[in-house]
Image (cartoon, grey):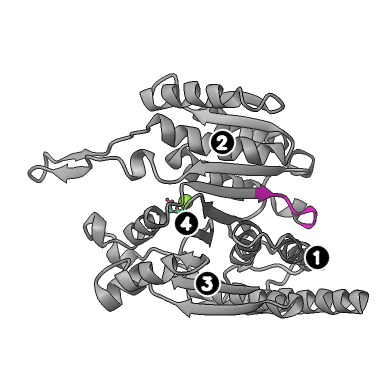
Amino acid sequence: MILKLTILPGDGIGPEVTEQAVLVLQAVADGFGHRLELQHKLIGAAALTAANDPLPSDTIQACLSSAAVLMGAVGSPEFDHYPNHLRPEAGLLRLRRELGAFANLRPAVLFPALEDCSPLRAEIVRGTDILIVRELLGGLYFGQPRSIEGAAGARLALNTMRYGETEIERIARVAFDLAMKRRRKVLSVDKANVLECSRLWREVVTRIAQGYPEVKLAHQYVDSAAMLLVQRPKDFDVILTENMFGDILSDQAGGVVGSLGLLASASIGGAVGLYEPVHGSAPDIAGKGIANPLGAILSVAMMLRHSFELEREAVCIEDTVGSVLTQGSRTADLAGKSQTAISTTEMGRQVVDAVKAAGSVNKEKSA
Ligand code: IPM
Ligand code: MG
């Protein structure tokens, strides 16, 4: 198969982790007989610096003419005081919209080797396997009007939370469909005791659930869900929630399973899938070679699964990451006091080597 991709390294640690993810992808492609066609484009602060636009039109064109997009991260303190449309994040939000990527899947799985990396006791976190399904094109992120207006000292800031029934229906279907392939539990997270958006959300999700009699649906307010996520993480299967709540809970889930650096994501539902680690650009550690590339590497696995239906290839990456962690390899975010941390490139190299070793076993079997 030809895998035609646009690579958007982005800002901060984005380029470092993306480079390792692409090396792993190349190793998997070699092992399974696929050919990569890659083009690299700018997004975020990198694009603002080069072209004064966080999402230049040639980046959009490249993404729309690819089969999938792999992104690193966007964000830079340099642009913190710029107006909204001239911030790195605006590039990513526009890209999500251009691609029609309304469904953001964020798995948070505890690798058995990482029990000790969680701040929670092993018996609490053991067995955690959560899939957060986050609505990605609605809510406060995109609602109009939005503004900051008025004279200094008396300014008024405004954001709008807005959800339409069809928007809720389509993301609910994604969550229920995925739950059917898992443990058949959906927890819909909202704030229906306070927000109209959440009341409509709850009503529509309940209606969609009727088409999935085998899936057990429950509802939880977001504050209480945040508490339960640390108290009983293994009780969760699929979490279905709106854009902002999903943003917050997914970082929390990263903390629960040991490090945000491990979390991958897929943004799907539109013409072209977008794959990116859940973590940000982490300017504080950028350029030091210590970032964890596994979130980016696992995002490649999600890409192979969701955009190309290459399940064996996806599982190969996921198993390989598991075995590298089992051997004790740890980047700085995961290393305990008595452990030596390895660099971003060394972690990438170990995954590549393990993929190649698995590939030669495959070839021997089929020979
Ligand atoms: C994420 C990030 C983004 C978001 C930012 C960078 C715009 O935090 O993907 O979780 O809020 O969606
Ligand atoms: Mg986030």
Q: Secondary structure at mark 2?
A: helix
Q: Residues within 10 Å of mark 1 (few under 14, many from 20)?
A: some
Given contact means CB atoms under 8 Å apart, are the residues at marks 1 and 4 in contact?
A: no
Q: Secondary structure at mark 1?
A: helix
Task: Locate residue 16, reporting x and y percent.
Answer: 53, 75
Residue that numbered label 2 is attached to: 173
**326 vs 267: above or below:** below
Which numbered disc, 4 or 3, marks the residue that appears first in the sequence? 3
Which numbered disc, 1 or 3, marks the residue that appears first in the sequence? 3
Tell me how far mark 1 sits from mark 4, CA to CA. 34 Å
Tell me how far mark 4 sits from mark 3, CA to CA. 13 Å
Given contact means CB atoms under 8 Å apart, are the residues at marks 2 and 1 in contact?
A: no
Which one is closest to the eye, mark 1 or mark 4? 4
**71 vs 213: above or below:** below
Residue type, numbered disc 4:
Ala
Which one is closest to the eye, mark 2 or mark 1? 2
- Using the image, tell me which numbered label, if any, was put on residue 271: 4
Q: Nearer the viewer, residue 280 or 195?
A: 195
State the extent of the magenta-drawn residues as a range: 108-113
Which numbered disc, 2 or 1, marks the residue that appears first in the sequence? 2
Q: Is residue 340 left or right of residue 141?
A: right
Residue 128 within the magenta-colored segment of the rendering: no
**Residue lying farthest front?**
1
Q: Residue at x 55, y 22 (%)?
A: 206
Residue that numbered label 3 is attached to: 5
